[in-house]
Image (cartoon, rainbow, N blue to C red):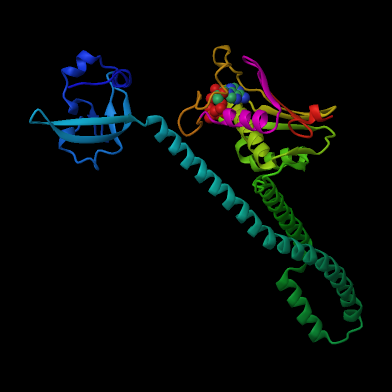
């Protein structure tokens, strides 16, 4: 048996150790057990398998097996390629594509809901007005009852009307119907706001940058993220006067969302201990040809020891399901690489964290263009 240097490096066994091993000692099945004979597998089935390194780490490998005769004895050459990183990237890509598909669907659904919710709203407003008029008319008609009764005209019909009024509980209806209408209108308007925010948030990405109102974008993102935020923190939004910013709005919305969710997580960890709600602040300011957006929280802060790691892809301190460690890496790539801006933070243990996004109004290169 002979192995090359890369094999020694990847698997962590010394050349000497390798020479005393069988090829089957490296393979693992899905369930983690050592597999059967490598040289009994046909080249096709050896593609994309898992093997174990000396330290017990499982790696994904592609194996190309060639059998031949050497000195009249059967021999085999296995070309093993470590594809762990590639598999991981493929998985991430699939995940990202899934999210993108969900995002696209969400935009479509928001669009679909928008139309009916609009006419439900319009009709409710119409009914509200109509009922206000009818109610007034009804009161006038009812005013006729007393004079007609005292004049003794058609008592049988009057008795019938009395009965019908009692059956309809007219006083109650006159009182409650306007309330029911305005509550329904409230609800419909809330749904319409969410749908509008969803549409704006999931705005299909354009190739070119477009001038956008970032205050409105932040407001939409806050609506979309409301369910993540409202149980743990009060939102304090302070929007300054902003010029339109040339940007990829869908991407920036993603950044805002990532930072807001991080803030909500940080606040929640504190709330779980203290039981008192926190605050998440959003502030925007324009200074010359730069727009500054800060998102601050009253969470526990970012420990000194990890401050230089948080922007790294896949760095996370959160359990699986809560975090993937990609939020800040994506945010930085969007802000810095795509928009020529900066993404920085200040953090104080026990007090909270503020992330600051600075964006050039006219996109990267604007400073040199001026
Ligand atoms: N506002 C914040 N307060 C405290 N820690 C934070 C905050 N934002 C980010 N972090 C830290 O940075 C890490 C990386 O963040 P991120 O890239 O968004 O990934 P994820 O949120 O999936 O963990 C988080 O796991 C957390 O430890
Ligand atoms: Mg995150």
Q: Quick one: which residue is furthest to the front in this view?
A: 71
Point 75% across, 34% down: residue: 363
Q: Is residue 197 above or below residue 63?
A: below
Please give left or right for residue 19 compared with residue 211 in the image.
left
- Tally of marks: 0
Q: Quick one: which residue is furthest to the left in this view?
A: 72
Q: What residue range appears in magenta?
A: 325-353
Q: Position of residue 175 (x, y in %)?
A: 78, 61
Q: Position of residue 25 (x, y in %)?
A: 19, 25
Q: Is residue 176 above or below residue 275?
A: below
Point 64% across, 28% down: residue: 277
Point 62% across, 15% down: residue: 350
Q: Is residue 288 above or below residue 155?
A: above
Residue 21 quadrant: top left
Q: Nearer the viewer, residue 17 or 142?
A: 17
| Residue 166 seen in this snapshot | yes
Q: Is residue 237 rendered magenta in the image?
A: no
Q: Quadrant of the C terminus?
A: top right
Point 68% across, 40% down: residue: 221
Q: Quadrant of the N terminus?
A: top left
Ligand 2, what quadrant?
top right
Q: Position of residue 94 (x, y in %)?
A: 46, 42
Q: Position of residue 167 (x, y in %)?
A: 70, 73
Residue 19 quadrant: top left
| Residue 270 seen in this snapshot | no
Q: Nearer the viewer, residue 259 or 190?
A: 259
Q: Is residue 352 rendered magenta in the image?
A: yes
Residue 163 quadrant: bottom right
């Amino acid at each position: 048996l002979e192995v090359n240097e890369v094999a020694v490096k990847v698997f962590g066994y010394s050349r000497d150790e390798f020479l005393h091993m069988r090829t089957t000692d490296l393979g693992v099945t899905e369930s983690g057990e050592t597999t059967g004979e490598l040289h009994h597998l046909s080249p096709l089935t050896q593609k994309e398998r898992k093997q174990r390194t000396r330290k017990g780490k499982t790696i994904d490998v592609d194996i190309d097996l060639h059998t031949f005769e050497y000195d009249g004895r059967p021999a085999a050459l296995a070309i093993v390629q470590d594809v762990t990183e590639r598999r991981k990237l493929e998985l991430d890509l699939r995940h990202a594509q899934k999210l993108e598909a969900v995002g696209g669907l969400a935009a479509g659904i928001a669009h679909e809901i928008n139309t009916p919710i609009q006419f439900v709203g319009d009709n409710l407003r119409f009914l509200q007005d109509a009922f206000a008029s009818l109610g007034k008319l009804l009161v006038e008609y009812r005013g006729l009852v007393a004079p007609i009764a005292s004049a003794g005209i058609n008592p049988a019909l009057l008795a019938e009307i009395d009965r019908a009024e009692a059956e309809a509980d007219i006083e109650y209806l006159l009182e409650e119907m306007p309330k029911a209408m305005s509550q329904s209108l409230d609800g419909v308007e809330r749904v319409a706001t969410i749908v509008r925010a969803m549409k704006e948030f999931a705005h299909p990405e354009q190739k070119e940058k477009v001038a956008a109102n970032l205050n409105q974008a932040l407001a939409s993102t806050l609506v979309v993220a409301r369910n993540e935020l409202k149980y743990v923190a009060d939102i304090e939004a302070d929007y300054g006067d902003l010029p339109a910013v040339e940007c990829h709005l869908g991407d920036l919305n993603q950044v805002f969302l990532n930072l807001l969710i991080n803030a909500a997580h940080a606040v929640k960890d504190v709330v779980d201990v203290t039981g008192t709600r926190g605050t998440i602040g959003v502030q925007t300011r324009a200074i010359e040809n730069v727009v500054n957006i800060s998102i601050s929280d009253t969470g526990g802060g970012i420990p000194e020891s990890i401050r230089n790691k948080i922007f790294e892809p896949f760095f996370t301190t959160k359990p699986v399901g809560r975090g993937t460690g990609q939020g800040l890496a994506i945010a930085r790539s969007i802000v810095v690489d795509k928009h020529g801006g900066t993404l920085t933070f200040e953090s104080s243990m026990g007090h909270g964290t503020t992330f600051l996004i600075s964006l050039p109004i006219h996109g990267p290169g604007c400073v040199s263009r001026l």
